[in-house]
Image: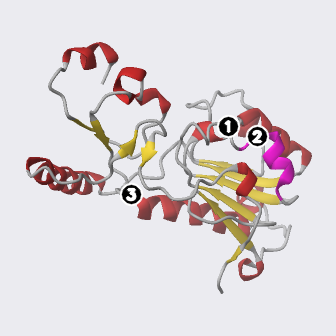
Amino acid sequence: MPPELFARAKKLRWICAARAGLGGDWFYDALVQSDVIVTNMRGSYNEHLSAHAVAFLLAFARRFEHYLPQKQWQRGPGMIDLPTQTVLIVGVDGAGSEADFVIVTTPETPETLGMFNASLFSRMKRGSYFINIARSRCVVTADLIAALRSGQLAGAGLNVVDPEPLPRDSPLWGMPNVLITPHVAISGAPYRQKWEEILLENCRRFAKNEPLLNVVDKEKWYRRGNGRRTLPQALLREGTKVSG
């Protein structure tokens, strides 16, 4: 809702955003400081996002970034044995150390903007893989490119990138160890049905003056009760092994 329209909506009590992630572009001082409740559609396409992340992980593990473009019968690098690898999922409670694969699922908040920068990439395990299915502005693109060029990162799977659409002259397009999909991870997800379920349940709750689902913290741009924040300082503590 634009600020000029919000200023005229004197009786407004609730805004239902038709998306899961809102980000800073949604919020301005008048809205943040008001009593108006904002909800989102969080949880509408978790399965599809997870499948996309796993697809990137398996593609790198099976060396698709090497074999698919070569168009000839020639063996190259060996496969990665996933049961021996450590995967860090950034965006859920917990953290990881010396991760072989880092999967970003974090929302865009004031704390996560630009969190993956040169400093953080330098602290990651050299030769690790970076997968982002979350929010593009959580990553400093120039620093990601530098980490890929230096070999600090062995590869990257990107469903989101800053800016979008990615310019044709971006170095990322020409990097053989980078897999890019144009923000399509939720394509095919039956999310509108889930949206309707969330909206109808919240309408019922609103009519009865009950707590709403998916309430957004307007200062943090994300849900309330999110538990611990996954910040750069907390990223490299304990790992989660991929079970075989």
Q: Nearer the viewer, mark 3 or mark 1?
A: 1
Describe the colour scheme in one phrase.
secondary structure
Q: Amino acid at mark 2?
A: Asn
First reached walking from the N terminus: tag 2 or tag 3? 3
Report the residue marked by disc 1.
114
In percent of width and height, residue 11 lies at 14, 25
- The relative height of residue 77 versus residue 132 in the rendered view (above or below) is below
Cα gap from disc 1 to disc 2, whole angstroms: 6 Å
Cα gap from disc 2 to disc 3, whole angstroms: 28 Å
Q: Are marks 1 and 2 in contact (CB under 8 Å)?
A: yes
Report the residue marked by disc 3.
45
Of 199 and 213, nearer the camera is: 213
Q: Are marks 2 and 3 in contact (CB under 8 Å)?
A: no
Crowding near pointer 1: few (<14 within 10 Å), some, many (20+)? some
Q: Amino acid at mark 1?
A: Gly
Residue shown at 75% from the left, 62% from the top: 67
Q: Which mark is residue 26?
A: none
Cα gap from disc 3 to disc 1, whole angstroms: 24 Å
- The relative height of residue 61 versus residue 117 in the rendered view (above or below) is below
In this figure, what is the number of numbered marks?
3
| Magenta segment includes 92 | no
Of 75 and 193, nearer the camera is: 193
- The relative height of residue 135 versus residue 168 in the rendered view (above or below) is below
Report the residue marked by disc 2.
117
Give residue 160's quadrant in the image.
top right
Residue shown at 67% from the left, 50% from the top: 231
- Where's the N terminus, which quadrant? top left
Residue shown at 49% from the left, 40% from the top: 220
Q: Amino acid at mark 3?
A: Tyr
Residue bounds of the magenta highlight: 116-124
- Where's the C terminus, which quadrant? bottom right
- The relative height of residue 87 versus residue 126 in the rendered view (above or below) is below
